[in-house]
Image: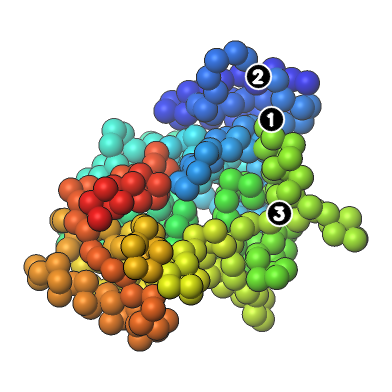
Amino acid sequence: MTPLIPTDSDDPEQVQAALRDALDGGSARGFGMLAGAPVEVPEGIAVVIATSGSSGVPKRVALTAEALRASAEATEERIGRGRWLLALPAGYVAGLQVLVRSIVAGTEPAVIDGRFSPRSFAEATLAMLRPDAGAGTGIPELYTSLVPAQVATLLGAADDTAVRAALQTYRAILVGGQSLPEPLRERAEDLGVRLVRTYGSTETSGGCVYDGVPLETAIVRTVDGELRIAGPMLAEGYLGDDALTTRTFIRDHHGIRWYRTGDLGLVEDGVVRVHGRADNVIVSGGINISLDRVERIVRRVPGLHQAVVVGVEDERWGEASVIVVARGEVLRRSEGEQLEHARDAVAEEIGPHARPARLILVDELDALASGKPDREAIRRVAAELR
């Protein structure tokens, strides 16, 4: 066993120093989720990361240096080598991988100064292009990793010449953490912004499927409708939870180790299509309804691109779905009109049984440190206001 040395995930420099040591075979490093007495981990574990816990209790995922490197190297092979901007918390796997990719590429990551905003993003990007930015000779290829909410914020400010130019500077902007609304993707394409939609999790050392195509060393298949992933980037398991590790990471009759994602989807002609969480389903009037699928449709409606769909108890149907959105996002039309647009869109694609029951406006959507919606907190608010 090896002592786990806590590291402050709010301090990128401290995390990067710990990562360099871990990737070189030094002591294991934990990232901001440890409390109480020191913890020991099995030999070979480089990093332990707490998952976001968007719909449940956070889990502590144990990753080896080999897994982190495998992910970073596969990403580099797919999109190229260059300099990375850290725009996410370093204790979140997408942020952590920005640092790992920088170490593997031999480049120094840039870090946004202060809170994320269109201005701070543009300023950090411009600084990366200066000759004295520590990137060596010539202008480097630039990369970053964002969540959809950040993309929406930047695209919303793209009328600003500096913000638009910054967005267009990147060879690739990886977008993950949750599904990317189609209107955002189309807006980015119109502006010449190169977004790459990623799919993966902390258990896969971050994204391992880019624009629907698995990275070179990753394999994706479906079993009973569930997506499963194999490859050298898989985590060792969950710290202190052998039962969950055994249920989640399984071996087939060939001895290949697979991660059970808990996501529903399919693989057609080598392209992975994710339909949503197997456990993000409500039963309304005796019919199963995927809230992820309803949310994807709702987010195509103008003014609801950042909406979150959650399930609440319903006296008549048992359960019902409701749309929760920040007031500032909604177009200047009545709540009733906006809801009807969403209900019509859902009924047309899924059926009338799946129509959301209500639209709830809040001042601000609860979010996790990763930038993803805090669905459990949003669900509680919706239940109270319902």
Residue at 42%, 81% in the rendered image = 350
Which mark is on residue 39? 2
Which mark is on residue 240? 1
Q: Position of residue 52 (x, y in %)?
A: 48, 42
C-beta proximity under 8 Å, tags 2 and 3:
no
Which mark is on residue 25? none
Q: Position of residue 85 (x, y in %)?
A: 42, 44
Query: Which residue is tagged 3?
Result: 259
Q: Nearer the viewer, mark 1 or mark 3?
A: 1
**Nearest the camera: 90 or 189?**
90
Residue at 70%, 70% in the rendered image = 224
Q: Nearer the viewer, mark 1 or mark 2?
A: 1
- Mark 1 closeness class: few <14, some 14–19, many ≥20 residues within 10 Å: some
Residue 43 visible in image: yes
- Mark 3 closeness class: few <14, some 14–19, many ≥20 residues within 10 Å: many
Q: In the rendered view, would you say 47 is above or below 224? A: above
**Nearest the camera: 312 or 277?**
312
Distance Cα–Cα, label 2 vs label 3? 25 Å
Distance Cα–Cα, label 1 vs label 2? 10 Å
Q: Quick one: which residue is furthest to the top in this view?
A: 37
C-beta proximity under 8 Å, tags 1 and 2:
yes
**Nearest the camera: 314 or 179?**
314
Q: Quick one: which residue is furthest to the right in this view?
A: 254
Q: Position of residue 89 (x, y in %)?
A: 43, 37
The amino acid type, in three-letter code, at marker 2 is Val
